[in-house]
Structures are given as structure tokens and as C-alpha cells.
């Protein structure tokens, strides 16, 4: 007699999850195991994993023609997370487990050859998709229980083996030996995050510190240029410490990205601190943008979402890699195309770039003569394309420090003091734009900014003259205005004055 077993699983496309119906039919015929529904290589190999796991768990495998269908058929299926759903559907088709309400339960897990259930990447967004579709009961590997539990409304069932799951579903077998379950997974908070460097430790650099504060308050992009050893890297690493903590929605989004990338430690709960990504200058395009077989993994650009992407020694990066930043800077997302699918990952970040003035780094040094020719300097900075530089809001020269402060009291402000001003400025922006559909000055369209500025302010500030002479592009005008609005917010003014616009133009003036 033909038997059909049905379960549910989730297929991820980027951070978007789709419910997949898993149907298994066992019928008379030559023994075979056929898997249909547009599976990739990893899904296709589940036939061997499921067969070995069922035999190792003592259930055997039906000597019949078994057909497993993953529906909808047009949706590409990737990864190993379908193993558990296929195995349970097989147990239902064999009569070992009753169908009952199992069709409303979602299964996410990979099977090992001995029947153990292994965790898979992307559990958090997959569980979120299941809950959003009204399927709140989710079965996952024991190691994934904490991550799945981060989703509100999810009823998580954690299992360590296929045998344990079958017993929980009512299979007529003896209780399995005690194994690692959700209760055995360490539930304590993991070691606290390493503290961010404090701005109080930065010596001098008043202009660069102010630019960093502006960048944090309005979510602007920043380029530090200057000789090595004067604080460029340190100031960039201080930026997450002066950014506000992530909101609940932002935390879920950022945590989901790290879950798909396989870099999430669920013991720490949702990610609350803005992330900091500082890829090495040898990073490839795939490492920056994301990629890989099956479900594409997010790259550094997406892992920096709602945080900071820092490119140290940016002229040393491949020009091709630098060009990949242009789309995310404009659209706030990365799109990875495959032959049968497209994955989209959010990527709104603060871009901070640091560069020496020349290959030897001593163009503005003290006591060391620069050996680079003018042509070499231009060629070095020319590795950063004009279109990319035009998307940077502020270009700041970090000059050599000439003297140490006489005592600790002369040190700069701490990150906590700066963070308080940043939070106040951001609150003003959120209040201003609460009915406009955006939150921060960096997201506001230029038309809105110009329409709400004082009459004749652009002419008074000289911005229109700079545009006429070609000293700045129209995109640059909008970025200057956004920085000017952020300066006004930090100063507590309702709108920019001419001095704000002039100061924003000065910060955008290219060095070298």
C-alpha cells in the first residue's frame, strides 16, 4: 500500500525564508530513492545521509521506490537543513510515526551517518520565517536550541538524534539513552565582549575626533589620510563605542546575518553592539561581498550592517574590491546573483577608510624625508576611484602629533561623553524625520534638505559657486548638506547656518 508522509522545512534566500512542503511517497517497485524539487548538490546528498541515519538508528530503510518531493518545485533548495524533515516524513510513510499534527511542525537539521542531528547555518532567520508563517513549533538540533529560542513566539523542540526525535513523536521504541539535549547546552552568558578603545586615549587630533563624532551622529562615511602611527586605526576602532546600541529590530537583523554566515555564538543572545568589520587588504571580492555554493554567505560588507566597515591602508586593496562598495553605499544592500536565484543582504554601515599620504607614508612626517615622487603619490591615491571618493562625506587629514599632553587632565573627552552627544543628535533627527520614512540625515534626500534650509543659505555659504566651478558634484552637494545638518544637530540648532555648510565643505576638501 502506498504511504505518504508530510512535514515542513524552510529554504533561505538571503535572509528571506520560504516554507517548504516535504512529501515522501513509499510505493511498490524497484528499490530507489528519488529526490525532486530543484535540490542543489548538498540537498541531493541528503538521500545517503538519511538512509544511513535511519539504518544506524534501528529503523531500517524501506525496500521500495521512495520519492521525496520538496515543494514548491520552482524554489531552489540549498543546504543540509532538509535532512530532518525528509527523515521524519519517511518515518510517517513507513508507519513508524503517525502523521497527526506533524504536518504543522517545521524541521531544521542535518543528519550524521550515525543518526545524530547536527546544527545548520541560518537557524534564526529560518525559525523567524516559520513563526511569521504561523508555524511556531520548530524542531532543531540541540546545539541550535539557544539560537532558535531568540525568536519570539517560537516553540522550540531540541533533539540530539533521530532516535530521540522518533521517540518524542510517539514511535513504538524504547526511550533512547540520555543524550545532549537543549537542557545540556550551556545557558549562561558567554564571556563579555571586549571593550571598545576609548577616545580619551587618542592624543590630539581635534579635527579628526570631531569628524568621527559627526560620522557617528549622522551615519556618514569618513576617510582618514595621514602618516602612520598617529591614531587613524585607533580612532576608527573607537567608532562602535560612540554609536547607540542597536534597537530590537536591528539586533534581530544583524544577528540573523551572523547566523547565516555561521559566525554567531548564540550563548550571547542577540547582538546589541554595532558590529565592527576590518578585513585585511588582501581580502577577495567574495570575502567582501559574500558568496559560496548553496546559500551564499554574507561577506564583510553585510556583516558590518548597522555597524562599521573599516578599510585600513585602503589604497592597498584591490581596485576591483573597492568598486564593490559603490552599490551598498547607495542602496544599502548587497545583491548576489546565482543562475537560479538571487540573494539580498542588507548592508547599511559606516564606512571608515584610512590611507597613508604616499607609499612610504612619510609625506607629512617629521624627521624622515619622503622618497616618493609626486607621480608616485598620485598613483597611490589614484587606486581609490573618483566615484568611490565622491560617496565619502568627509576627507580628514590626520597630522603628526607634535607633543604629548602634560597630564591626564589634558586628555580628550571619553567615548561615553561623546556617545551622549551622539545619542542626543540622533534623537533630534528621528523626531525631525518621524513622518518622512527615514531616520538619519545620511538617509534624507537632498531635495528635502535644501527645501528646509534658510533662504539663500546655499549661496551665502559658497556651495553654489563650488558647484558652478566643478569643485564639487551634485552628489557632493547633497553630502555636504547632510553633514551640515548633523553639525547643527550636535550643536542643538534646528537647522544649519552658513558656518555649518562652510565647515562641511572644508571637511570634504580632498587632501594631497
Image (cartoon, rainbow, N blue to C red):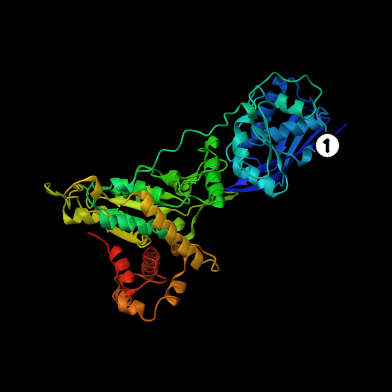
Quadrant for residue 103, please give it. top right
Image position, residue 496 (x, y; %): 37, 71
Residue appearing at x 55%, y 36% in the figure: 266
Q: Residues within 10 Å of mark 1 (few under 14, many from 20)?
A: few
Q: Nearer the viewer, residue 433 or 75?
A: 433
Say how many tags the image has.
1
Q: Is residue 457 left or right of residue 136?
A: left
Q: Nearer the viewer, residue 51 or 242?
A: 242
Which residue has dot 1 on it?
100
Furthest toward the bottom, the residue is: 455
Q: Is residue 202 left or right of residue 120?
A: left
Q: Is residue 129 left or right of residue 4?
A: left
Residue appearing at x 28%, y 66% in the figure: 506
Residue appearing at x 68%, y 42% in the figure: 154
Q: Nearer the viewer, residue 417 or 270?
A: 417
Q: Secondary structure at mark 1?
A: loop
Image position, residue 324 (x, y; %): 42, 53
- Residue 324 appears anywhere in the view: no
- Residue 216 appears anywhere in the view: yes
Quadrant position of the N terminus in the picture: top right
Quadrant position of the C terminus in the picture: bottom left
Q: Is residue 207 left or right of residue 442?
A: left
Residue appearing at x 50%, y 65% in the figure: 431
Furthest toward the right, the residue is: 1
Image position, residue 330 (x, y; %): 45, 60
Image position, residue 335 (x, y; %): 52, 53
Amino acid at each position: 500500500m502506498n504511504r505518504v508522509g508530510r512535514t515542513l522545512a524552510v529554504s533561505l534566500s538571503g535572509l528571506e525564508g520560504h516554507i517548504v512542503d516535504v512529501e515522501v511517497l513509499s510505493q511498490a517497485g524497484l528499490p530507489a530513492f528519488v529526490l525532486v524539487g530543484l535540490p542543489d548538490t548538498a540537498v541531493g546528498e541528503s538521500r545517503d545521509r538519511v538512509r544511513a541515519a535511519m539504518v544506524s538508528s534501528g529503523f531500517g530503510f524501506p525496500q521500495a521506490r521512495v520519492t521525496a518531493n520538496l515543494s514548491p518545485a520552482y524554489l531552489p533548495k540549498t543546504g543540509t537543513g532538509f535532512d530532518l524533515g525528509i527523515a521524519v516524513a519517511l518515518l510517517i510513510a513507513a508507519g513508524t510515526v503517525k502523521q497527526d499534527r506533524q504536518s504543522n511542525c517545521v524541521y531544521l537539521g542535518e543528519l550524521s551517518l550515525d543518526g545524530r542531528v547536527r546544527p545548520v547555518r541560518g537557524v534564526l532567520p529560518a525559525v523567524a520565517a516559520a513563526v511569521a508563517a504561523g508555524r511556531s513549533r520548530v524542531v532543531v538540533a540541540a546545539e541550535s536550541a539557544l539560537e532558535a529560542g531568540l525568536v519570539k513566539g517560537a516553540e522550540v523542540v531540541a533533539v540530539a538524534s533521530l532516535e530521540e526525535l522518533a521517540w518524542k513523536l510517539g514511535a513504538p521504541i524504547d526511550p533512547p539513552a540520555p543524550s545532549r539535549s537543549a537542557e545540556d547546552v550551556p545557558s549562561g552568558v558567554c564571556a563579555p565582549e571586549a571593550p571598545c578603545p576609548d577616545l580619551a586615549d587618542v592624543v590630539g587630533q581635534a579635527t579628526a575626533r570631531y569628524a568621527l563624532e559627526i560620522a557617528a551622529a549622522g551615519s556618514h562615511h569618513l576617510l582618514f589620510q595621514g602618516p602612520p602611527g598617529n591614531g587613524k586605526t585607533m580612532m576608527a576602532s573607537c567608532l562602535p563605542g560612540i554609536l547607540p546600541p542597536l534597537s530590537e529590530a536591528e539586533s534581530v537583523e544583524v544577528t540573523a546575518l551572523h547566523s547565516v554566515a555561521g559566525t554567531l555564538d548564540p550563548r550571547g543572545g542577540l547582538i546589541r553592539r554595532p558590529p565592527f568589520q576590518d578585513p585585511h587588504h588582501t581580502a577577495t571580492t567574495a570575502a567582501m561581498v559574500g558568496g559560496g555554493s548553496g546559500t551564499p554567505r554574507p561577506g564583510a560588507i553585510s556583516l558590518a550592517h548597522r555597524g562599521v566597515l573599516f578599510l585600513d591602508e585602503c589604497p592597498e586593496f584591490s581596485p576591483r574590491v573597492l568598486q564593490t562598495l559603490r552599490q551598498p553605499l547607495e542602496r544599502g544592500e548587497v545583491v548576489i546573483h546565482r543562475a537560479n536565484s538571487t540573494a539580498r543582504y542588507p548592508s547599511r554601515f559606516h564606512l571608515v577608510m584610512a590611507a597613508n599620504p604616499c607609499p612610504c607614508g612619510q609625506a607629512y612626517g617629521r624627521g624622515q624625508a619622503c622618497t616618493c615622487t609626486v607621480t608616485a603619490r598620485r598613483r597611490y591615491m589614484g587606486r581609490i576611484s573618483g566615484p568611490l571618493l565622491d560617496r565619502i562625506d568627509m576627507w580628514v587629514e590626520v597630522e603628526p602629533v607634535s607633543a604629548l599632553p602634560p597630564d591626564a587632565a589634558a586628555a580628550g573627552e571619553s567615548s561615553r561623553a561623546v556617545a551622549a552627544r551622539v545619542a542626543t543628535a540622533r534623537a533630534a533627527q528621528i523626531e525631525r524625520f518621524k513622518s518622512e520614512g527615514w531616520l538619519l540625515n545620511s538617509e534624507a534626500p537632498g531635495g528635502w534638505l535644501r527645501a528646509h534650509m534658510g533662504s539663500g543659505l546655499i549661496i551665502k555659504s559658497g556651495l553654489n559657486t563650488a558647484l558652478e566651478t566643478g569643485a564639487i558634484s551634485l552628489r557632493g552637494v547633497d553630502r555636504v548638506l547632510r553633514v551640515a545638518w548633523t553639525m547643527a544637530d550636535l550643536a542643538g540648532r534646528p537647522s544649519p547656518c552658513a558656518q555649518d555648510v562652510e565647515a562641511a565643505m572644508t571637511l570634504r576638501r580632498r587632501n594631497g
